[in-house]
Image (cartoon, grey):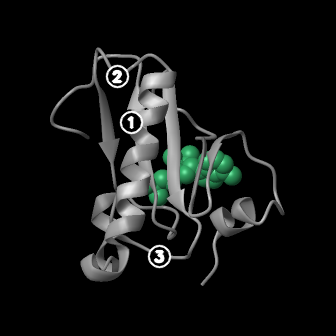
Amino acid sequence: MSTIFSKIVNKEIPANIVFESENVLAFKDIRPQAPVHILIIPKIEIPKVTDIKGNEHAKLLGEMFDCANKLANDLGIARNGFRLVFNCGNDGGQEVYHLHMHLLGGRHMQWPPG
Ligand code: AMP
């Protein structure tokens, strides 16, 4: 089922887009949890991590990580470090069922996460 993120991909609702390629879109999280908080998503609808198929999606996932590294460099957080998060399912705290990678940075992160 389509989510709000597909509407962002299709430009039906606005978002603060910071990167776009043929297969990947990145935009600022509407409720940022760090000075840098960007969501990196595939344009196709993959609901969650457990729907990823390595043989089918490996290139796409590589493009998402390339995007994260490019943005981390461009935004000046690569040197000090950052965190990449995929929440999966109810216990993982996933709210939007369109695969997304959180890129968080610009402050020191705690561990373990809440
Ligand atoms: P998750 O809990 O991993 O599913 O994360 C979903 C994230 O999407 C949350 O951090 C929300 O703040 C963010 N979010 C929800 N709607 C929007 C939107 N329209 N634009 C940007 N970020 C959004």
Q: Residue at x 38, y 36 (%)?
A: 69
Can residue 94 be seen here?
yes
Q: Whole-Å distance between the Cαs marked 3 and 1?
A: 21 Å
Q: Give percent across and percent down for residue 2.
A: 64, 78
Q: Give percent across and percent down for residue 60.
A: 42, 65
Name above or below for residue 6 compared with residue 18. below
- Residue under pointer 1: 69
- Residue under pointer 2: 78
Secondary structure at numbered mark 3: loop
Task: Indicate the quadrant where residue 10 lies.
Answer: bottom right
Disc nearest the viewer among 3 and 2: 2
Q: Give percent across and percent down for residue 86.
A: 34, 55
Amino acid type, mark 1? Asn
Is 21 displayed left or right of 80 in the figure?
right
The one nearer the camera, 106 or 73, is 73
Q: Whole-Å distance between the Cαs marked 3 and 2?
A: 27 Å
The answer to whether the residue labelled 2 contacts the one labelled 1, judged by CB atoms less than 8 Å apart, is yes
Image quarter of the N terminus: bottom right
Name above or below for residue 69 compared with residue 85. above
Can residue 33 be seen here?
no
Image quarter of the C terminus: top left
Q: Earlier in the sequence, mark 2 or mark 1?
A: 1
- Residue under pointer 3: 46
Amino acid type, mark 2? Ala
* Label 3, residues with CA under 10 Å away: few <14, some 14-19, many ≥20: some
Q: Within 8 Å of ligand 1, the CB of disc 2? A: no
